[in-house]
Image (cartoon, rainbow, N blue to C red):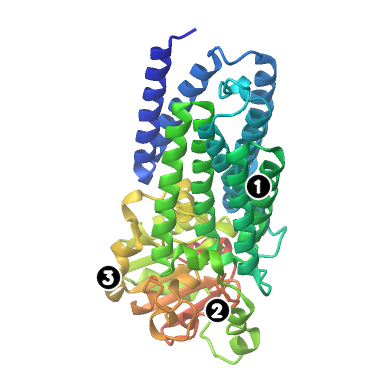
Amino acid sequence: MLSVNMVAMAYLLASVLIIFALKGLASPETARRGNALGMLGMGIAALVTLQMDAVQNYVWIVIAITVGGLLGGTVARKVPMTHMPQTVAFMHSLVGLAAVLIAVSAFIDPGAYGIANAEGGLYMASRIELFLGTFIGAITFTASLIAFGKLQGILSGKPLVFGGQHLLNLALGIVMVGAGIIFCMNEATLPFMVMLGVALVLGVLLIVPIGGADMPVIVSMLNSYSGWAAAGIGFTLGNNMLIVAGALVGSSGAILSYIMCKAMNRSLMNVLLGGFGGDTVAASGAAGQVADRPVKSGAAEDAAFLISNARSVVIVPGYGLAVARAQHALKEMVDELLERGVQVKFAIHPVAGRMPGHMNVLLAEADVPYDIVFEMDEINSEFADTDVALVIGANDVTNPSAKTDPSSPIYGMPILEVSKAEHVIVIKRSLSPGYAGLDNDLFYMDKTMMLFSDAKQACESIKQAL
């Protein structure tokens, strides 16, 4: 057994490794190293925890690690890149569930966790910690399950809105906090169970009115919730490592949510109180209106002619690229262009895809060089000097109405300004609107050529034509 000081030093080392892991994950070039450092830090923390005196029975622990490891490894190997957002959301739900189960266990038997007072009850500080960890964990659990259902297609991606929704949520929030305060004052079972039950319901009600366009922000926000839930339970368990790791995850998730909301020109409260994709918004992009507007369409040979004669090409990937699993075909097409001396760059919008960094991971999987992948702020000024902008599966993040139409629901949202390029090629299956439910004015510009096709098939055809 390790001494108290040795445990503290090991936890400190693990915490430092996790901090460096987050630093490494900030860039695709260092992401592998960041992952390795994070795994090493968590491995040290787990091994140190397992040898502590509080661990009395290793049988169930070994069984849990074996089952969880097998399930996690199987899922990680088989889940396609398009399903990564919902996989992340599901993992967040497990963190929330773990926090709830630990809190309930600590409430039932505080002595086993070393938080019992002389009368066998809970200290006031422990009650407050349980209150915070329980309701944050419960909301995280059910909210993440709803997000998973929406992303997986099990539930409708459209917002579910009804009259008095916000007032109901407010009332439930007051009941939850009130029950939590009563629990903290007298340690009664009923207020604790009421608080837990209301928190579980609130997790559902907070996510159902949010549309698909806001899911990247929601995934990031739930990541933050899971971190704070873990930190709250860390206080209950007196585990400094869990507190540090949870706080790091919670704060980094909150910062990322803020960055993504800024990229959408929206506040986090605006996202939570009503998402894109409602009936009013969807009506503006109805199929009847789409059919009335003429577009220029072309074939892969036309696209190949344009980009092969271009001096510079900027490629804008979107969720359609992920759905078609076209990243490797795109990489082969890009290699062909680079051999011809064409300058090729990639432009990534902060909320492209269905989760933060979705497009970056997709391109990294195909070994696209990091030095030709640029964020929106870095490349927007170059579109005016670009010969061809090639949009593959992206929609809302390229919609010019965000800058030109004050009546548009996305007006003011920063976009990739592909409309400033000399020529625009859009690879898309149809003219259907994106997650925001809006028709895209880019499709109907004189300079735009629509290539109606599956992204993978289109990239393969263009390469063949080249």
Snapshot quadrant of residue 382: bottom left
> Residue 397: x and y, percent?
45, 70
- Which residue in the protein does label 3 denote? 381
Label 3 vs label 2: CA separation? 25 Å
Judged left or right of residue 23, residue 73 is: right
Q: Earlier in the sequence, mark 2 or mark 1?
A: 1
- Residue type for callout 2: Leu
Q: Residue at x 40, y 40 (%)?
A: 31
> Residue 345: x and y, percent?
34, 61
Location of the C terminus by quadrant is: bottom left
- Which residue in the protein does label 1 denote? 195
200 or 456, which lies in front?
200
Q: Secondary structure at mark 1?
A: helix
- Residue type for callout 1: Met
Q: Are marks 3 and 2 in contact (CB under 8 Å)?
A: no
Q: Residue at x 42, y 85 (%)?
A: 406
Q: Secondary structure at mark 3?
A: helix
The answer to whether residue 287 is above or below residue 159 is below
Q: Residue at x 40, y 19 (%)?
A: 8
223 or 201, which lies in front?
201
278 or 425, which lies in front?
278
Res. 193 in view: yes
Mark 2 or 1, closer to the camera: 1
Q: Secondary structure at mark 2?
A: loop
Q: Earlier in the sequence, mark 1 or mark 3?
A: 1
Res. 76 in view: no
> Residue 283: x and y, percent?
62, 83
Mark 1 or 3, closer to the camera: 1
Mark 3 or 2, closer to the camera: 2
Q: Earlier in the sequence, mark 3 or mark 2?
A: 3
Snapshot quadrant of residue 458: bottom right
- Which residue in the protein does label 2 denote? 438
